[in-house]
Image (cartoon, helix red, strand yellow):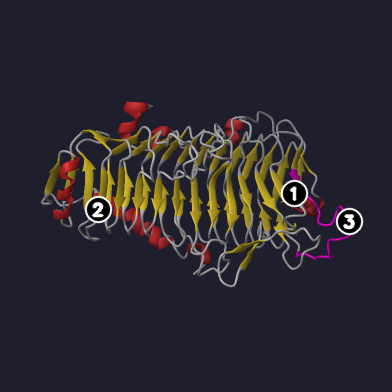
Amino acid sequence: MKPATVFINHVFSVIALAAAFHSLSLSAREIPISNPAELKELGSALPGDVVILKDGTWADANISVQKGGSAESPLVIRAETPGGVVFTGNSTLNIRAPYVTADGFLFTGPHDKKEPVGLRSHHGILRNSAIIDCNPENLETPFSWVTFAGENNLVDHCYFTGKDNPNPVISNYSGFCHNAVTACYFKGIPHNRTKYTARIIELWGGSEFDAKWDFNGGYSTVQGNLFDRAGGDGSIIVIKSNGNRVIGNTFLACPGVINMRAGDYNVFQDNIFLGKGVKGTLGIRMSGVGHIVQGNYISGCDEGIIVDYGDYMDKNLTGKYANSFHFATPPIPIPSYTQVKKVTFKDNVLVGNKNADLDLAARYKVGWPRWQTILAPEDNLVENNRIVRPNGGAAVVGTVPGADKDPVIPKLTFLPNKYVGNVIVGGTNSFEPSKDGFKIKTKLPAGWTEANEAANFKPLTPADVGPDWIRSKFL
């Protein structure tokens, strides 16, 4: 079994469980709860029961689910009507037991403590819910809105908007993997509106940056979500682990990037980036080994796909190298950026981007001399990608290693990358090592339109994601 697919059955089991919740037995017991004082009744709930919270405003409610359900009979906690239970103040929902789903809740307004929602066991689901403007008075106070502190959990058909404080909207604690975020709507998460603005989703692995495949797996899925002007701190999705999948998402005018920051064997497939000419909109930035970047559509962005140089750690070349170390004993050196190797870039379509569509060897000596990013991408496959530039310009760029002839840099050799069957229409290729693998067509086809180019790609809309009730109330 290929490393990138090891975790797929686990994720699919979580999603299948979500569907199963819709077909609970009609004989399941219903437990009504009218106010926070009655939350003690949660202790009497049994597998298969449905706990129904009465519609209204619930201020400073702290819900901690200590007893759950089973695979055959999950426990459900839901609002009387979807969106009818409004949690305000420092309300929190912590699912600390397995096979529990929370359905139809709204968290809104100032919030000054820890994350509103914590999925702290396994096979828990937050669905059909929303978190809106739950920011602390002091915007320096860090917390996520949803955290995975367990495995095989799912956030599905939820809505998030207005986060201003540090820490991602959704994140996992290191060591908690096999989670999923599906069919959610992230709207209006500001890009640098304050200096504290956070990224949208961050996925850690088992041991931060340890490169061992079996030790640092994230094995999580981000699929079918709409990011609408949700740039966060400029890193929309940050991957810091192995074996994750980012598939079929739409990014609409998001000033930021999918940042493959650390980890190996991740999949980035069938995502759609529509920059709409907004400053700072990017596609995918890459470091690491064995990834698949396939079938993505990137249009109207500042840049498309960026392939970084890696960090040379064999010796301190300048006397100023400040490599960081993992907190393990003995310390493990951590590269600033891992060298890109054995990555497949295939069947991507890039249209009408402002700057380079493919930067195949980017950020040479970035951070020098504190970082030693001089390891060129090697042994990668760039195949069957299509680039269209209606206004001309350089479609493919890159820096040849050692081009600056810096005497402190050792003589390094790199395996060649493979370039096969790629096409550039209306643009040029300025990266000499790749020129044989790109066919240049100087003129656009007669009658060409970007709409025709995009016809095979179906971006998600607000009607496809998030809770149904959110559209009537807030959109």
| Label disc, if present, on residue 65 of the rendered structure | 2
SS at badge 2: strand
Q: Which of disc 1 and disc 2 is earlier in sequence?
A: 2
Q: Position of residue 270 (x, y in %)?
A: 53, 47
Which residue is located at x 81 percent, y 60 percent?
318
Q: Do labels 2 and 1 touch, CB within 8 Å?
A: no
Front label number (3 vs 1) = 3
Which residue is the site of mark 3?
405
Q: Position of residue 8 (x, y in %)?
A: 43, 61
- Residue furthest bottom in the image: 330
Residue type at mark 3: give it. Lys
Q: Is residue 375 visible?
A: no
Front label number (3 vs 2) = 2
- CA gap between label 2 and label 1 equals 57 Å
Q: Position of residue 349 (x, y in %)?
A: 62, 43
Identify the magenta region.
396-415
Q: In the figure, is residue 163 to the left or right of 27?
A: right
- CA gap between label 3 and label 1 equals 27 Å
Image quadrant occupied by the C terminus: top left
Q: Which of disc 2 and disc 3 is earlier in sequence?
A: 2
- CA gap between label 3 and label 2 equals 62 Å
Front label number (2 vs 1) = 2
10 Å crowding of disc 1: few (<14), some (14-19), many (20+): many
Which residue is the site of mark 1?
438
Q: Nearer the viewer, residue 264 or 464?
A: 264
Residue 372 sits above or below residue 129 on the image: below
Q: Which of disc 1 and disc 3 is earlier in sequence?
A: 3
Q: Nearer the viewer, residue 143 or 16?
A: 143
SS at badge 3: loop
Residue 161 in magenta stretch: no
